[in-house]
Image (tube, rainbow, N blue to C red):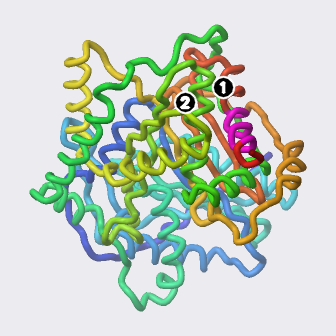
Amino acid sequence: MHVATTCLAVPFLGDGAGAGPLTWGQQEIWHTMRRTGRTLNIGGTVTLGPDATVADLAATLGRLVSRHEGLRTRFSLAGDEPRQTVAASGTVDLEIVASSAEDAEDTAEALRSRYEFTPFDLEHEFPVRWGVVTVGDVPSHLVVQYSHLAVDGFGIEALVRDLPHAATGTTPAAGVRALELAHRQAQPAERRHSAKSLRHWEAALRDLPPERFGTSDDPRTPRFWELVYHSPALHLALQVVAARTGVETGHVLLAAYGVALSRVTGRAPSVAQVLVSNRFRPGFADAVCHLTQPGICVIDPAGDLDEVARRVWRSATSAYLHGYFDPADHRAMLDRLAADRGGPVDISCFVNDRRGPAAAVPAVLPAAARIRAALPRTTVRWDRTLPTYDGTFYLQVDALDDAVGLAVWADTHRLSPAQVEACVRGIESVAVEAALA
């Protein structure tokens, strides 16, 4: 497949130029990028309508970069104190890739993959990549990737919400900015908040058994495997249990995860680092920067799912409130705790529920017959493999059309592929059994 590529330099002009340290969220993701060796670039592909033009896309890109400091930030990451510098003006590239109509989708996917897996030169490159696939002179796909150091998933949603304002330019960009936040996080009030969060972490971990997993009897190479699971029945079952218990479907799913993981590993309690958006904090909702940090959730799997879900609600709520802290102090706390206990506590499990409003409980709950009828429509497949990943068991939850999508990255040297699949199937079966009880 031959493609022709050109680059259009798109100018930007914005306020807020300056330099400063990284925010806590930026430090968190930079530490993860450095530890795993992964780019963690974030974005996707949009199929464009017939009215799209390259000129309009370039103008939109220029306006967004002008409005949002995070998109015109470069990073000096050498040494122990990384820093960021916001530019007032400059250019970013809009890559234009010509393709035939029959190859446009494959061309867009190849571009997306290149953008995702090619590390940013963060010291010299702005953390935004936009590319347009054209058929003739007409754009067919827009491919976007950002450095995770500059923006998280909720920041991308904030960018999308800002598009109408960017088109008119009538209002300033909303939300806290990274340089402003980094300055705030050095002040006593934020330092006290960090210390309070770390006391919560330490209390949660101090009496926790150290081992979460054994050793796999079926290790694979590459070491990390991804299992993708789509379940309409789980989607319906979560609604029933959530309505009965009065907690959100995300807490019911987290409870089912805790029960299923405990059954597979033979260890209790289960643990999850839940990814906390921090968007509920004042000024954070519309911020285009990286604010996500982990919170610690300990799950006692004893009893029926209703009981577990109610306990998870309390544990997860505390996790969300205490998922905002100085990562350097957090690592120091974990090191101190490991020294006191004679070894580290394994908390390498993550749950990232990205469903948002799609996780809401409907006014009319599904009947038992509908849940049973949905079970045969579950699909499961093994997908990608990687030599490294972030954690032993990483569960990502997404909303699909009338289904819940589970994507698990697991360390096959700690959990065999059969155990991984048993755990994911267990999440569905635990929830469905509870819904039908």
Is residue 432 shown above or below 244?
above
**Lower sequence index among marks 1 and 2:** 2
Q: Marks 1 and 2, how far apart in space?
A: 9 Å
Residue 90 can be seen, yes or no? no
Q: What SS does tag 2 mark? A: strand
Q: In this view, does 286 lie to the left or right of 423?
A: left
Read off the magenta span: 424-433
Q: How many numbered circles are shown?
A: 2
Q: In this view, does 307 lie to the left or right of 427?
A: left
Q: In which quarter of the image is the C terminus?
A: top right
Quarter of the image where one finds residue 335: top left
Q: Could you say which is closer to the camera, residue 40 or residue 112?
A: 40
Q: What SS does tag 1 mark? A: helix
Q: Is residue 33 left or right of residue 77?
A: right
Q: Mark 2 points at which residue?
A: 393
Secondary structure that dominates the magenta span: helix
Neighbourhood count class around disc 2 (C-alpha, 10 Å): few under 14, some 14–19, many 20 upward: many
Name the kind of residue labelled 1 in the image.
Val
Is residue 402 shown above or below 347?
below
Tag 1 near tag 2, CB within 8 Å: yes
Q: Mark 1 points at which residue?
A: 420
Give the residue displayed 46% in from the left and 77% down from the top: 63
Say if the magenta span includes residue 134: no
Q: Position of residue 325 (x, y in %)?
A: 26, 48
Q: Position of residue 427 (x, y in %)?
A: 67, 37
Residue 434 can be seen, yes or no? yes
Quarter of the image where one finds residue 205: top left
Give the residue displayed 32% in from the left and 54% down from the top: 74
Give the residue displayed 87% in from the left and 46% down from the top: 377
Q: Residue 243 carries which label?
A: none
Name the kind of residue labelled 2 in the image.
Phe
